[in-house]
Amino acid sequence: MPLDLIMFAALIVVILLGYPVAFSIAGVATAFALLGWWLDAFSIGMMGALGQRFFGVMTNPVLTAIPLFVLMGVVLEKSRIAEDLLETMGRLFGAVRGGLGVSVMLVGALLAASTGIVGATVVAMGLIALPAMLRNGYNPRLAAGSVCTAGTLGQIIPPSTLLIILAEVMSSAFQQAQFAMGRFTVETISVGQTFAAALVPGLIMVVIYILYILGRAFLIPGDAPAMQRPEKRVSHAEILGAVAPPILLIIAVLGAILGGIASPNEAASVGAVGAILLAGYRQGAPRWLILTGAAALGLLAVAAGLQPVRLQRSDAGALEYTLGTLYAGLVLIGLAAVIVALQSLMRQRIIVAAMRQTLVVTAMIFATILMASFFSLVFVGLGGEHRVATILESLPGGPTGALIFAMLFIFVLGFFLDFVEISVILLPLLIPPLILMGHDPIWLAVLIAINLQTSFLTPPFGFSLFYLRGAAPKEVTTGMIYQGVAPFILLQALAILLIWLAPALATWLPRALF
C-alpha cells in the first residue's frame, strides 16, 4: 500500500484514539516525513518551506477575521440576548400546532447569522426551548432533532467560521487549478462571494425544516401539539426588543461585506464592537450613551464612505479640516459608549469569560490549520496530491462521478472528524481536481458547506449531539437524540440535491453582487 494512503489512514486512526487533534496531525506528519526520508520516498528539504507556510497562515487577512467573529458570538451568548430571543419567539408561535418547533428554527437562523457558534446555540436552546417543548407534549425525538439541527445553521448561514475557512481553502484550490490550466492572471474567491453564495441555500434549508415540522404536526398532531397552557400575550415592543438587536447586527456585518464596503476583518470588527454595545445595553449601561455612541459610529461609517478625508494631502482646505474635526468627534462619542459598555460587562464578569472562550476557540482552530498545513506538505511530498487526482479522474461517470465520490467521502468522514479537520486536510486535495474537471468553485463551496454541516449531526461524534446531551433533561436519552436528527440529515441531503439540480440558487447572488 502506498505510503501516502497509509499516512491518511493513520491520521484517522490516531484522531479516533482521542488525542488532541493538532498534536495528532503534527505527530503523524512528523513520523511519516521521517519514514519517507528513510525509505527515500520524501525529500526532507521540503521541510524548509514549513516556516513560510506557517507565516502565511498567521498573517492571512481572511483567517484573522475568525477571532473577531468568535468574540462577537460569545459576547451575545453570554449577555443572554439569545435567551430573550428564544423566550419571545416561543411565546409568539407557541399557539400554533408545531409552532414551538418553528420558533426554534427561526431563532436558530437569527442566532446563526448573529453569533455563528453551534455549541452556544444548541446549549441555550437545549436549556430553554427543549424543556418547553417536552412540557407541551412534543415527541422527544422531534424536539431533540429540531434543537440539534437549528444549532447547526450557524455553519451554513453567514457569517460563520466554516464559510471563512472554506472560502480560503476554495480560493487557494481555485488558484492552483488555474495555474495547472496555464493561466497566470488568476481569479480568486473572496469571503464575500462565499457568504453571498451560502445565504440563499441557508434560508432554503430553514424553510425545508419548517415545512417538515409543520407537515409532521399536521399528519401526526400528537408529535407537535399547540401550547396547552395560555401564556401572556407577546407585545409588539417585546418582539421588537428581542428581534431588532440581532437583525441590526446582521445587517451591519453582512451588509458591509456583501456591499463591498468592508473587508471580512473590518466587518468582523464592526460585529465585535456592535456585540459589545448590545451586551452593554442589555447589562445596564446608560442606554442613552449606548444608543448615541452606536448612532455616531454608524454615521461615521456612512459619512467616511461617502466623503473620505485625507488631512495629509497638501491641498486639504477648510472643508477637509471641518469634516476631520466632525469625524474625530463622532469617534470620541463612539469610543465613550464602547468604554462604558466594557465597564458594564466587566462588572458582570462577562467580558473576561468571553475573551477567555474566544482565545480557546481561536487557538484550537489555528493550531489545527497550522498542523494541517504541515500534514499537507508531507502528504504532497509523498505524492498524495497526484494520487488523489488520479483516483478522481479514473472514477466512472467522469466529473459527475468524481463529485459524487467526493461528496460521499466527505459525508462519511463527517461521522468521525470535525469540519475544521476535513476542511484543512482533505479539501485542499480534493478541490483542485474537481475544479479542473469543470465544476463551478462557488457552487462547489456551497455543496461542500451543507455536507460539512451534517458532520455536527452524524453519530457517533457529531458535536451538536454532544452539546445537547449535556444540556438535555434526563428523560431525553442519547438514542432519542440520534433518532431525532436522522430525518433532518435526510432533509440536508435533499437540500444538497436541490442545489445540485439548480446551481443558480448558489451562484446568482454572488454574480449579481460581485
Image: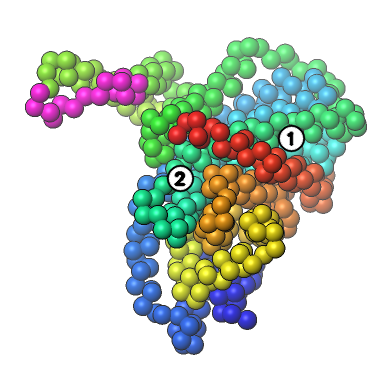
Question: Whole-Å distance between the Cαs marked 1 and 2?
Answer: 30 Å
Report the amino acid beneath label 2. Answer: Ile
Relative to 55, is 166 above or below? above
Q: Residue furthest left?
A: 314
Q: Looking at the picture, how far across and down is residue 331, in whole percent?
A: 29, 24
Q: Which residue is mark 2?
A: 189
Amino acid bearing label 1: Tyr
Q: Residue at x 42, y 47 (%)?
A: 188
Asked if residue 192 can be seen in this view, the reply is yes
Mark 1 lies on a secondary structure that is helix
From the top left corner, tell me how far across and down residue 9 is, in percent: 62, 72
User: Would residue 456 be visible to someone looking at this image?
Assistant: no
In the figure, 155 relative to 317: above or below?
Answer: below
In the displayed structure image, the side of residue 62 where residue 31 appears, left or right: right
Residue at x-position 78% and y-position 50%: 482
Q: For the point 10% across and 23% down, which residue is it? A: 315
Q: Are marks 1 and 2 in contact (CB under 8 Å)?
A: no
Q: How many marks?
A: 2
Residue 14 covered by magenta stretch: no
Count residues near mark 2 (Cα–Cα under 10 Å), then give few for <14, some for 14-19, many for 20+: some
Q: Which mark is residue 493?
A: none
Assign a secondary structure to mark 2. loop
The residue that label 1 is drawn on is 209
The residue sitting at 49% across, 76% down in the picture is 382
Q: Which quadrant would the N terminus be assigned to in this image?
A: bottom right
**x and y, in percent, of residue 216 in the image:** 85, 33
Q: With respect to residue 344, does 236 lie above or below? A: above
**8 or 18, which is in the foreground?**
8
Q: Residues in magenta?
A: 300-315
- Foreground tag (1 vs 2): 2
Q: Whole-percent x and y of residue 141?
A: 82, 42
